[in-house]
Image: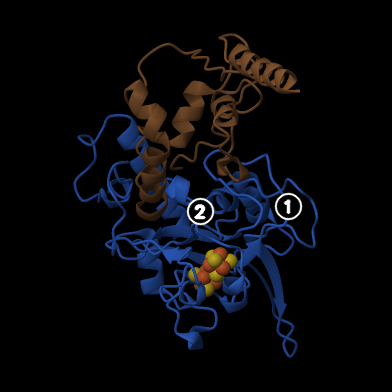
Amino acid sequence: MRAIALAVLWGLTFAAAHAAEPGRTPLPAIAIEKPGQCVEAKDVMRRDHMKLLKHQRDKTLHEGIRTKKHSLNECIACHASQKTGTVLGKDGFCQSCHDYAAVKPDCWDCHQPKPGQKTAGARP
Amino acid sequence: MSENNIDRRKFLAAAAAGAGFVAIAPGIRLVEIAAAKPDNEPVTSKVRWGMLIDTTRCQSGCTECVSACGKENGLSEVKKPRTDAQWIRKIDLKELKTGRALSLPMMCQHCANPPCVDVCPTGASFKRADGIVLVDRHICIGCRYCMMACPYKARSFVHEPHTDQNPEVPRGQGCVEGCTLCVHRVDRGGTPACVEACAAAGHNAMLFGDLNDPGSAIAKRVREVKTTQVRADLKLDLGVRYEGI
Ligand code: SF4
Ligand code: SF4
């Protein structure tokens, strides 16, 4: 009986170790289609993009500051997949990482995940 | 009067786009160009955006402003007339005794003392320094108090999910919203879509500008002719005024 329990335990440990092997764990697809410099360093963006976006959104909405640097629309313009045209979808720049990290931001309830200004709004 | 002003604006815009500021003749004010603030500067209370609607020019049956608003702000996606968001609507009025009829667009009046802001329990309804009243959808909980408080029925609740937003105008299910005076255009020196559409249709019944700038077309007009605030008795100090009602 004890031997069987040990064997089962050993089996489980083995299975767990096996699953952690590279290539067998799902990783986010981070495809940078447009080469070039992001607005901040990669590690800053990975950790703090949400803080930058939140800061910018308050500035834009309440004070009318419409600089491009930390604007969500600019992120989308650069990072939308050329194939699907959006930052969402299985391999979308935003969604694949958020899925991996199991976070569910509600940006997309209101914001358009596809780039492209529909109207220019120039002074007549 | 207002045609002249539009010509002047066109001239100023063309002058600014072309030869720059040098070629502008003496005596012509640069204020309307200056109103297109740099992107990195916050709005200030030096400006008070306003609109003047000339009901003698507004045509009954014309809905150019309403459709322009829907297109600009992505309001026409769902097509459920009973619950669709409505930022601007046309109203036909008739004085029964005399039969005098008028037509006018009604939308958020951008009150200086906005009841919607007073009642909002979260601080989502707010007034910008330049007088534009907005909803911060990041904070709005969809309680709809503001819809009850607004005397002009200017706000709508978004009942359905949306996917066809204009990237410049984020909006979605569960929040209350209303006319933004096309703030995304105004911040870049543009005019609201409805005003543009009304002019394009040749009616020129809507005039948009800075009420605080004594040289602006709208400030001149409100100085010269009698204009009315709807329900002025509420003392809300409206940004939108009407002529001929
Ligand atoms: S018209 Fe209504 S929604 Fe607009 S500022 Fe006044 S109370 Fe608020
Ligand atoms: S619906 Fe939103 S904006 Fe209106 S009162 Fe409630 S929280 Fe404020």
Q: Chain of mark 2?
A: B
> Residue A83 placed where, x, y %?
64, 15
Rendered-image quadrant of the C terminus of chain B: bottom right
* Circle 2: residue type: His
In the displayed structure, B123 sits above or below A56; it is below
State the colouring used for the structure image: by chain
Quadrant into which the N terminus of chain B falls: bottom left
Residue name at image x 54 percent, y 53 percent: B195
The verdict on a common chain for dots 2 and 1 is: yes
For marks 2 and 1 on the same chain, the one whose residue lies earlier in the sequence: 2
Q: Residue at x 27, y 52 (%)?
A: B31
Q: Secondary structure at mark 2?
A: loop
Residue shown at 48%/59% (left/top)?
B207
Chain letter of the brown region = A
Rendering coords of residue B224 (x, y %): 38, 73
Q: Which residue is mark 1?
A: B160
